[in-house]
Amino acid sequence: MSQLEQLRAAMGRAGVDALWISDAANVRYLSGFTSGKDGKVLVTPQDATLYTDARYTVQAAQESRVPTFIARPPATLEHAAPGLAGLRVGFEAESLTVAELEQLRTYWPQATLVGTAGLLSDLRMVKTPDEVQAVRDAQALADRVFAQVRPMIRAGVRELDVALEIESLLRRVGAESAFEIIVASGPRGALPHGVASDRVIGDGELVTVDMGARLNGYNSDMTRTVAVGTPSPEMARVYRAVLEAEEAAVRAVRPGVRGADLDALARDILTGHGLGEAFAHSLGHGVGLMVHEGPSLRGSSEDVLRPGMIVTVEPGAYLPDVGGVRIEDLVLVTEDGHEVLSRSEKEAV
Ligand SMILES: CSCC[C@H](N)C(=O)N[C@@H](C)C(=O)N[C@@H](C)C(=O)O
């Protein structure tokens, strides 16, 4: 089934006849138009239309897999209105603003507007072969960049300079950083999202580097914690515990496994090392057009892994004022198990 056919089936289950798609990643996913933030897609029982404005006339003609109508709101809404009379029209409750909803109410008075959630994000969880290749390419690039940057992670270098080098290497090959690069050294390692600061890396410290490449719209995500010199026995113990949890969770990735069970597996290992409280976030998340998307590998998740999903496995342990460790791999769920897409070496500490 095509993406559009799968979406129409999901719309039927949600009880809507048409869907107004406003989330930028969903617009891109469904239409192929790469400037999704400046577009909307309307899916009706018969048609799908990309609405964008005249800045994108040429680009939309080149990229969009669905017919395009060039206009700005409210002309877009006026164009759509006649076809929506009497229909139940879904909108994406997680991305449409209140002001935009009011505008839909004004211009589509004969439609019944219905809030929906997750119709496209559910589809996006399982990647097509082309999407898998796109994430694979992004991760391969991130691995190459990490290998180039690893030698500069040493005492006397600022975290910021490490991040800048990663960013510039990514930019030079036409990619960009998938998110603000995390370089957290020494005690800053206790910040799970310690974006690079002007702190100078010291001897005997662990340094957590969390980076991703965005290439052709698709993201990668990987974390390595590296040792500069010889870390304290306490931090070496934490590193080995996190590595044990990470490797065990990666080994367990296969179709049919629940995200919640993978989280519990890693959490139980860290708890056994007295680090359960120090693991301050979920085990992982899906990666694709967004760095964070479904499925979720957290305790409350009901997601079950299926072939074609791409997830991170990233346990961590964070000790305030002392330091922290996170180790993260990007993992493709295959028909009979998994394939680890991130290839960067993990150091023995
Ligand atoms: C702001 S993007 C940061 C990406 C980073 N690699 C990452 O995913 N960090 C995780 C610790 C994280 O944010 N996990 C989320 C899903 C959570 O546990 O709520």
Image: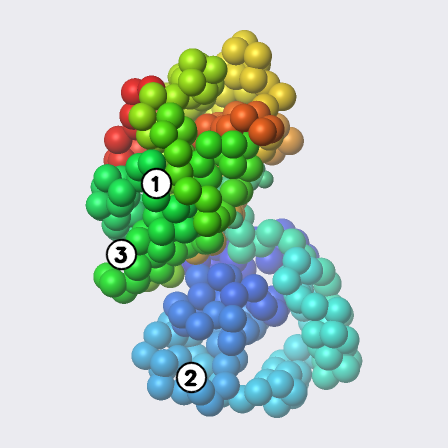
Report the mark closest to the observer, 1 or 2. Answer: 1
Q: Residues within 10 Å of mark 3 (few under 14, many from 20)?
A: many
Q: Which residue is mark 1?
A: 156
Report the mark closest to the observer, 1 or 3. Answer: 1
Q: Earlier in the sequence, mark 1 or mark 2?
A: 2
On the rendered structure, is 189 left or right of 61?
A: right
Image height check: is 94 above or below 230?
Answer: below
* Residue that extends furthest to the top in the rendered view of this protein: 272
> Which residue occupies the foreground of this view, 53 or 113?
53
Kind of residue indicated by mark 1: Gly
Q: Secondary structure at mark 2?
A: helix
Residue name at image x 51 percent, y 71 percent: 37
Residue name at image x 66 percent, y 77 percent: 84
Image height check: is 294 above or below 180?
Answer: above
Q: Quadrant of residue 90?
A: bottom right
Q: Earlier in the sequence, mark 3 or mark 2?
A: 2
Q: Earlier in the sequence, mark 1 or mark 3?
A: 1
Q: Position of residue 345 (x, y in %)?
A: 26, 31
Report the mark closest to the observer, 3 or 2. Answer: 3
Image height check: is 267 above or below 201?
Answer: above
Q: CA distance from mark 1 to mark 3?
A: 21 Å
Q: CA distance from mark 3 to mark 2?
A: 29 Å
Q: Quadrant of residue 218?
A: bottom left
Tag shown at residue 56: 2
Any atom of ligand 1 within 8 Å of the CB at mark 1?
A: no
Q: Secondary structure at mark 1?
A: loop
> Which residue occupies the foreground of this view, 269 or 159?
159
